Each structure stands twice: as C-alpha cells, then as structure tokens.
Amino acid sequence: MFLLIYAPKVGGQLDTLSVFCFLIFLWSFFRSKKLSTPSYLTSPTFKYVFFAVLMLGYAVILFAVYGLKDTFQILRFGRIIINILGIFGLVRIYYSYYREDLGRVLLFHLWLCIISHAFIIMLMFLVPPVNNFVLTQLVQLDEGNRSFEARILGNRIGGLTGSWDAASGIQSLGILMLPFVFTYVGNNKGKRRLIYLTIPLSLGSIFLSGVTGLVNIGIIGVVFLVFHFRELKKYVLRFVGVITFVILIGGVAYDYMMNHHPDLIVETSIGRTLFMVTQNKELSTSSKRGSTAAETIDKIGSEMYFLPKDDQTLLFGRGGSGRVDYLIKADTGPTLNLHNLGIFFVAILYLYCAFIAFKALKSSRKDLYMGMGISAVILTVLIIDAKVAYLLARQSLSIMLIAYFSLFWLYEQRKSQTRFNLN
C-alpha cells in the first residue's frame, strides 16, 4: 500500500507508482485463480475505469483539435486507469485475507502509511544526507526545478511527494484519523501508547511541509462538530485540554530552539508556518517568504480562481496542462480543470466527489468513527485540491480510492446486517 501511494516519480519521467499499480493488479489475479471478488468492489471499479477511458479519449480529441505539444492530460488519464486497477488489485488481495473486516483494515493501514511518511519527512529534516539521498538518488529531482534549492537545503520538505502543500495536508490525516484508529485498536494499552507517540510525529511533519495541514485540521474539525455535535460534545473539553497541552509543550520547545538552534526554525518552513499563524516578525524571513495566512487566502481567492474568457474554453476546455502551450496563473484544481477540460468535466467530477463526501459523513451516523475516518480522507483531498491541483494527482488518487472502497465496504456491511436482522 505504501508503494501504491508514495512510490516516487524518478527523474520527473518514470512513474514508479503506476509501475507498482500495474504489477499489483497482475499479482491479484495470478496469486489465486479461485479468489472471488464481491460486486461492491468490482462495480465502482468499472465505473471509475469507464470514466477515465472516456476522459482519455476526450483528452486525445482536444490534443488533436488544438494541435497541442502538451501531452499532460493524455498521460494523466492513462495513468489514472492504471492506478485505479492497481488499487482494485490491492483491495482484492486484502479481501482474500480480511473479508469481513476489509474496510477497517484498509483504513488503518492507510493511516500507518501516512505515519510512515511522517517519519521519512522528519528524518529528511534531521539528517541532511537522507534528504540529499531522497532528492538526488530516489526522486532524482531536476536541478532546474524552481523548488530544488529550497528542498535540497531542507527549507521545505515534501517527503516523497511532489508538493509540500499537499504533503502538509495529507499528513494532517495522522491527527484527523486518530478517533478511528483508537477505536480500531480498542483497549490495548501498548498500542494506544504507540499511537500517542505518533502525534508529535504528525505535527512535526505538518510544520515541516507547510500550513495547509493546520488549516485542514481546523476546517474538518468544524465540519465534524457541525455534523456530529451531539456525539462529540463529551470530547470537546478533552480535546481543548490536549490542544492546550500541545501548545504549552510546543511553546517550551520553540523557546529552547530559538535560543539555542534558531537556524532550525527561522531558515526552514517551520518558521514560515509559525509566522503565518503567530505573525512573529522574527520569523518573516523564513524561506524568503513572509506572506500571512490572510494574504495567502486573498491571493488564492482574487488571482487563482477565475473563469475562462471565451465560451468555447469554458464549455470544452483547451486540453493541455495550462503550463506549456498556454499559461494559466493558477495552482488551484477547480480553475485548472475548468480551463483545461471544460465545465462538463468539472461538474461531473466535483459533484460526484461532493456526493461521496456527503455519503461518508452520513455513514458516520451509523458507524461514527469509521465514517469520520473515511470523511476525513475524502474531505482532505478536496480541501487540498482547492489550494493546489491535487484531486487527480498520483498520491491523492490512491488515497481517495482506498477511502472509497472502505466506504463501499461499510455500506455492504450494513446491508448484510439488515438482511440478517430480517431473517
């Protein structure tokens, strides 16, 4: 599962994630010819593959009509087909082992993958040779890349991902999925202690990548309170106590670091993240960027969200990436998709994702913690996409599909329980 989420894109060319997806898909069939696959796994897979094939054909048509050099969309939807089949193969293998507990195990292992990536991010920050190895040998980041200098110096760390903003957002799931994780392990004190130890690891990886993860925790926290206030109100005081404790410990650690090792804060993304939250002028030089959270939100809202100027682009898109054949000064997913693929594609894609997110939130009324875990994953990907194009990105697609299959399993379990009760 880790390789199907975080396998790097070597040298900006070889997508090892898709390679592993293809191999896993094949393995899921060769390992056991008698392995059955329930309809609640195959049905959504066929739908997703059909949609990806449809959009691949559409991207080819746009490519031919506009005479583009940019093959981004063709490669994207080709990769999406392979990744969908890869995650299906992974879930199929999991089903052969876990069956009745499939969804819970999938979600728990997804959390373990995110925690493992947090450890890699922390290791890259604390041990510069590790950072250098990942960037120059594993990921093989192009020296001409605009983020190369910041990454190689350890000023911004995205781990094995291509975007540190996206990395920060995904790492917030290490915190947001904790209610589900604690429920999953039950009263096992040993496992619970280990889980508590992952909290500083998750927070550290968030701060090293950027402020997106903190924003995501705040937004999804409010959503959970609105949808589940009755069930969660008994935990509010406990949560406030934990936050207060974390702030106090963090304050002591910050004071020590600023007095003894200021270079580990001011010259890194930790300083920039803290500046955006605290507005402390001492930290404004971090990464040579001192924009506040308010300024960032204003820039995204005023400059990065805009409609195409001509109706043809609005309706059908222009088929490229917005970076080669034509320039779009935006990083947000909805804007880029709107310009590149048109309003019909955007409507189908985002309305369906919104439907799934609502369905996940609704499911938590029957299974609170499982539903909250799935909702956290889906909402996180959508929130990140609102800041930087991520919904159809390599890691996000794998993460989202694992959550989707967990959701379908959850609904199937309810159907089975209903049939059992009727009988």
Image (cartoon, rainbow, N blue to C red):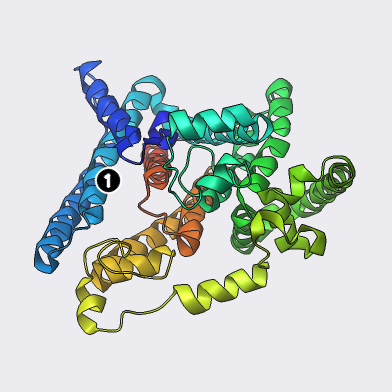
At x 10% / y 67%, what residue is drawn? 65
Position of residue 270 in the picture relative to residue 296 (left or right): right
The spot of residue 229 in percent (x, y) is 67, 60
At x 59% / y 71%, what residue is drawn? 297
The spot of residue 115 in percent (x, y) is 59, 34
Q: Residues within 10 Å of mark 1 (few under 14, many from 20)?
A: many
Up/down of 206 relative to 159, above or below? below
Residue type highlighted by circle 1: Ile
Residue furthest to the front in view is 144
Quarter of the image with the N terminus in it? top left
At x 31% / y 79%, what residue is drawn? 308
Give the camera-side residue of 295 and 43.
Answer: 295
The spot of residue 344 in percent (x, y) is 24, 70
The spot of residue 181 in percent (x, y) is 61, 35
Badge 1 marks a residue whose secondary structure is helix
Give the camera-side residue of 269 and 391.
Answer: 269
Give the camera-side residue of 167 and 42.
Answer: 167
Q: Which residue bears the numbered disc 1?
A: 80
Give the camera-side residue of 351 and 257.
Answer: 257
The quadrant holding residue 184 is top right
Residue 115 seen in the figure? yes
Quarter of the image with the C terminus in it? top left
Up/down of 124 relative to 349, above or below? above
Residue 87 seen in the figure? no
Question: Across the whole image, how many numbered discs are drawn on residues?
Answer: 1
Position of residue 270 in the picture relative to residue 227 (left or right): right
